[in-house]
Amino acid sequence: MSDDTVREQLSSLMDGELSTDSARFLSKRLGNDADLSATWERWHCARDILRQQGSLAPVDFCARVRDAIEADADAAPSTATAAGGMRLWRGLAGGAIAAGVAVFALMLGQPAVSPDAAQPGEAMLANVAPVTTSDLTPNWRLSPVADRQSFVLAQPQLSSEFDAYFVEHGLANGTAGALGIVSYVPVVATPDTRDAAPALTGQSAR
Amino acid sequence: MRPVFRLATLLLALASPLRAQDPLALIGAAQQAQSARSFEGVVVFMHDGRFDAVRVVHRPGDAGYQQVASLSGLPRALFRDARETRIEDAGQARRLPSIAIAAQAFDAERIGDSYRIRQSSEERIAGFQARVIDAVARDDVRHSQRLWINPDNGLLLGVALIGPRRETLQQVMFTSLVVDPRASQAGAAVAAAKPEAALPVSPPPGFRLIGERIDGARRSLILSDGLAMITLYLEPRADELDRLTTLRRGATQLASRQLGRQRAVVVGEVPLATAVDLANRAAQALND
């Protein structure tokens, strides 16, 4: 069996598209073929990163775990049977990986796939900032006017009372002000006193 | 700079003030143009989260007049000539004697004490080129202002009052404008007499009394810092109260403080704190 064929089968196994018998055969080979096992691990790490599943473990995380297991095995106190023990641990580790792959292959090989797993929506797109209304607003020369209003401490009855003061000030401003006739504009554009911002009034007894 | 060169520079500036590069000279030219240029147009007035369209007609000179009429919202019109000012609302008209104030608010010598004047850019307003001049307040006693002035005829094409957080409090801007190219000579002279009246209270920093009007028992004192204006009304009242009232229309703040039977009302395009402080101190002074 060529390497390309094996890699295709490995890819099919990851996608859950390999038959049960082929999956069993390939899992057995994964337990004995270190290169193929490393390829399997790299593909899984890459897929998890693309799907942003869990914490982003380093690409060689699986290899590090295996090396750590091997290091523990090397540091075991049974010096008399060190070589045999190491072979034993390696055999156990290989068997565990093969068993894990076999279980995974069998799970993927099941014909009944949950609807959630069948959803292709796990692929993540890059986050795109939503378009806001400000993006569509033309850059006008006229600046917006602040619309903050005075807050109310008591209901006013004073707007009409003070309207004459605004008018007289506007007239004086138009006569002597630096801005000339423009200063008259607020006088005629004064809103209806019924709709004007209410006065803020504080009162206390003397 | 040698005195000869300084004098030559001054003469050049006086000879062609409208073309002067100095932003301060341009503001002065804008005020002079108000009394020399005949024009009419439509301005947009943005305030209080809304905007109004207002038609403006200006005819300078001894027989001159000004007409200002709202084109949106409630109908209201103002007609002013040398004799009287008439304000017409729907179904009623008010007649007031036209206020004559000898001194002008604009004072090129003092404006720099309260504002940093700088020219920022050039823009096109109502078909006219406009130089944008910023008068940035040096303190929080007053608002900053942005002026759009045409360098050819000196007309003020727009003005915006800017708050402490650089927000636009109100803005007036021409959207259409027709200017008579002939300049009138009649209204160019401006009386420079200063009022001798005494203020009962110290004005806000940078402000100075430029006019006074007495109407019965009420005194109207007009203060200016060279650009912005405040009117301080002092009047006796029949009722006895201890009351502070504030009201705002656009960037114009009103603060009324009554103590006992004396009331001080401050109206001006200044921050609320400035208006309230002056009203409080004036009312207290009336009772002392």
Image (cartoon, coloured by chain):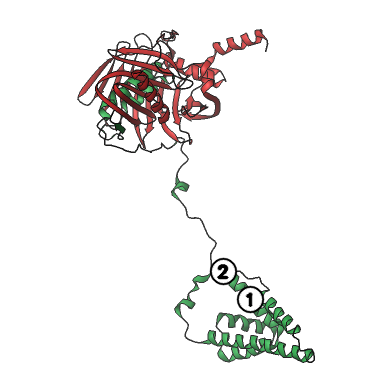
Chain colours: A green, B red
**Does A122 sit left or right of B235 as displayed?**
right
Q: Is residue B171 visible?
A: no
In the picture as drawn, the residue positioned furthest to the left comes out as B91
Secondary structure under tag 2 reads loop
Q: Position of residue B91 (x, y in %)?
A: 19, 25
Q: Position of residue A58 (x, y in %)?
A: 66, 70
Secondary structure under tag 1 reads helix
Is there one chain holding both mark 2 and mark 1? yes
How many neighbours does mark 2 have within 10 angstroms: few (below 14), some (14-19), or many (20 or more)? few
Looking at the image, which is closer to me, A76 or B6? A76
Q: Which amino acid type corresponds to the residue marked 2 in the rendered image?
A: Gln
- Residue at (57% x, 84% y) in the render: A104
Residue B132: mark in rendering? none
The reply to whether callout 2 and callout 1 are in contact (CB within 8 Å) is no
How many neighbours does mark 1 have within 10 angstroms: few (below 14), some (14-19), or many (20 or more)? some
**Does B220 sit left or right of A44 as displayed?**
left
Looking at the image, which is closer to me, A159 or A183? A159
Q: Chain of mark 2?
A: A
Q: Is residue B121 visible?
A: yes
Q: Quadrant of the N terminus of chain B?
A: top right
Q: In which image quadrant can residue B77 be found?
A: top left
- Residue at (38% x, 20% y) in the render: A173
First reached walking from the N terminus: tag 2 or tag 1: 1
- Residue at (60% x, 70% y) in the render: A49
Residue underneath mark 1: A43
Question: Relative to B43, does residue B14 appear above or below in the rendering?
Answer: above
Q: Chain of mark 1?
A: A
Q: Quadrant of the C terminus of chain B?
A: top left
Question: Relative to B41, does residue A55 appear above or below in the rendering?
Answer: below
Residue underneath mark 2: A52
**Does A179 sit left or right of A126 as displayed?**
left
Q: Which amino acid type corresponds to the residue marked 1 in the rendered image?
A: Trp
